[in-house]
Amino acid sequence: MSERPARRDEEEEGRARHSRARLVAACALVFLVALGVRALQWQDNRHYFLPFAGMSGEYKAHALTLVRGDLRGFLQGPDPPSDANVVKHPPGYPLLMAAVYALFGESDWALRLVHIALDSLAAVLVVLIALELLPLSVAFSAGLLVALSPQLAYHSFALVPDPLAAPPILAALLLLLRARRSARVAHAVAAGALVGLSCWLRSNALLLPFFMAALAPLLVARGRRLRFAAALVGASLACILPVTIRNAVYFRSFIPLSLSAGITLVEGIGVYDKEGRFGLPSSDYGVTKWEAETYGRPDYLGTRFAPDGVERERNRVRAGLRVMRREPVWFLGVMLHRAFSMPRLARVETIARSPATTRPLELPEGATPAQRVAPSQFTPADPSSTRLNFGVLTGLDPPLTFDGDAPGALFVSQPLAVERGTDYILRIPLRVERGSLVVEVLDARDRSLISATPVVHPINYLDYTADTQPFVNVERPFVTGDASQVLVAIRNGGARGGPFAASAREAELFALGPSSHTWTRLPRAVLRPVQKLFLTAVMLPLTLVGLLRLARARRWAALAVLLVVPVYYMSVQSALWTEFRYVMAMHYTLFILSAAGLHSISKTLTNGARRLFDKPRRTRA
C-alpha cells in the first residue's frame, strides 16, 4: 500500500518538472524572438534613427557630468535654482547611462544592448504575468505578441528612458498577482519599490501606486488590505523621496520628481485649440516665444528651463489650470479624446524585407552618383488628381514645387537601373513649407517598398514659408536585393493625406558596394508579414474579445490587474499631452488581453469546424 502513494508522488513530481521545463522553454523562446526582432529592427534604423536624438543628447550630457566626477554638477546643474535643466527629468536614466559609460566607455552601442536586453526581458515578464491568470498557451502567445510588436521593438533602442520604465511596472504587477496566494507585506513593499524605480526613469507613473493599492480588496483577504495598500504606497514614496529631497535642497521647491508637466499641459491645450481661443502655443519653441513676449524677457526665447526654470514651469501650470477652470467641458472632451487614442498602436516601420547596409555612409568628397533624377523626370503618380498643383519646370536648375492635399504618392521617377545585391544611398534636397513628406525607394517590377525616409516636416522653429524654410539634404540608405531597377517616389506624409507645400531638387543615387548579412532575408521574410498585422484595427478587437472573455468568466481580479495600468494612463496621462512612448507600459498588458481574445476566437472556430465535420459522420452512423 505504501508503493502507490510513492508512485503518485513521483508522477506528480515528474509532471511538475515537465511543466517547469515547458515554462523555461517558452520563456527562452520568447526572449530570443524578442532579441532577434529588436536586433533586426535596429539594423534597419541605426544609420538614421532620428527620433529622440535631441532628448538623448540632453540625457547624455547629464550622464557625462557624473562620469567626469562632478557629483555636485550632476545633482544641481550649473546655476540652481534658475537653471532647472537637470530637474526637467528624473535622475535615474542619466545614472544608468553613467554606469554603462563607466564600465564600457562612452559607448552608445553598449547602452543600446542594455535597452534591447531589458525590453526582451519585459516580454518574458508578460509570459509570467499571463501565466498567473491564463493557460501557458495563452501566456506564450502574449509573450510572442510583445516580442514581435514593431511598436515596442522600434522604441526599445531609443536612448530615452521610456522603454526602460515598463519592466519595473510589469515586475510590480507580477508581485501583485503572486500576493493573492500569500498576501505577504513583502510583496507589497517590493511592488511599490519597483514602481518607484520606474519613476526614477520616467515620472509618468508617479500616482500609479495609489491605483495599485486600490486593488487590495480584490487580491488580499479582509483584515490585511489596509496594511498591504499602505505598504505598497509607502514603499513607492520612500523610493522617490531622495529625488524630492534633492529638488528641495537645490531648487527650493516641492518637486516630487521632475519638471515638465506644465510645458506638456500648455502644449497639449495649444494642439487641441484649433481656433486659438486660449492663446497657448503648441510646440517647445512656441512656448519659449510665448513666454519671451508675455514676460518681456527675450532671454527666455529658445530655452525651456533656464533662466527662471522653476518659476516658468509654475506659470505654465497656472496657465493650463486657467483654461481647465474656464472651459471644463471642453477640456474633459480633450481628455476623453486622448484617452481613447491611447490604445491605438503607433505607426512605425516594420522589419525591412532586405537587410540594411552595414557600410559607413559618409560619402567621399566629390563622389559621383550612379544615377541622377532631375526634377523634370518626376511625374505625378496620379495625373488626374485635382488636389495636386506643381510648378512649371523652366530654367537651368529649377526645383519641382508642389502643393495641395492629395493623399498617398504624389510623384514617381522613371525606372533607374541599379546593381543587384548592392548598398546604395538616396540623397534628395527637400524644402517642406507645410505638412509633411516621405521619400520612398520602390522596386520597379511591382512597386513594392524597398526603403523609406522618416517623415520630413518643416523646421519647427522657423516660420512655415518658402522664404525661411531651407532645402535640407534628406538621405536614406537602401539595399537593392534582387531588384535591377528602382523608382524614387515622393508621397504625402500624413496618414490620411492633408495639406502640404514643398519643393524638391535633383535626387542622386550613390553606390556603396556589395551587400552583407544577406542570410537575414529568410527571418525577415517570416517576421515582416507578421509585423504588418500589428494594426489597431486588428489588435484592438482582439483585446476587446479577451476582455469580454474574462468578464464572462467573472475573472474580476484578473481583469483589474491587467487593466490597472491602462486605466491609470487613460485617466491621468490624458490630462497632459501624450505620445505612444509615454504610455508604452499599458500596451504590454493589453497584449495579454489580445492573446486571450486570439485564443478565444481560435477555440470557437476550432469547435465549430469540429462540429461541422462530425455531423456527417454521425448522420452516416
Image: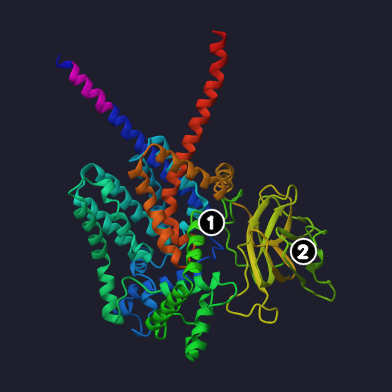
Residue furthest to the left in view is 2
User: x, y percentage for residue 92?
Assistant: 34, 66
User: x, y percentage for residue 331?
Assistant: 48, 68
Find residue 464 and report its image quarter: bottom right
Query: Height in image: 402 above or below 477?
Result: below
Please state if 465 lies on the left or on the right of 547 as rendered. right
Q: Earlier in the sequence, mark 1 or mark 2?
A: 1
Cβ atoms at labels 1 and 2 below 8 Å apart: no
- From mark 1 to mark 2, how far is it between C-alphas? 27 Å
In the rendering, which numbered label is found on residue 346?
Answer: 1
Instruction: Locate the N terminus and report the quarter of the image it occupies.
Output: top left
**Magenta residue check for 416:** no
Find residue 425 and report its image quarter: bottom right
Residue drawn at point x = 27 percent, y = 75 percent: 246
Q: Which residues are magenta?
A: 4-14
Within 10 Å of disc 1 (Cα), the crowding (few <14, some 14-19, many 20+) is some
Residue 110 visible in the shown view: no
In the rendering, which numbered label is found on residue 387?
Answer: 2
Residue 68 visible in the shown view: yes
Regarding mark 2 in the picture, which secondary structure is present there? loop
User: x, y percentage for residue 375?
Assistant: 78, 68
Regarding mark 1 in the picture, which secondary structure is present there? loop
User: x, y percentage for residue 226?
Assistant: 20, 54
Instruction: Locate the C terminus and report the quarter of the image it occupies.
Output: top right
Q: Could you say which is closer to the camera, residue 367 or residue 403? A: 403
Q: Could you say which is closer to the camera, residue 348 or residue 74? A: 348
Residue drawn at point x = 52 percent, y = 61 percent: 337
> Could you tell me the amino acid type at mark 2?
Arg
Q: Could you say which is closer to the camera, residue 237 or residue 56? A: 237
Q: How is the image coloured?
A: rainbow
Q: Could you say which is closer to the camera, residue 605 or residue 318? A: 318
Query: Height in image: 263 above or below 25?
Result: below
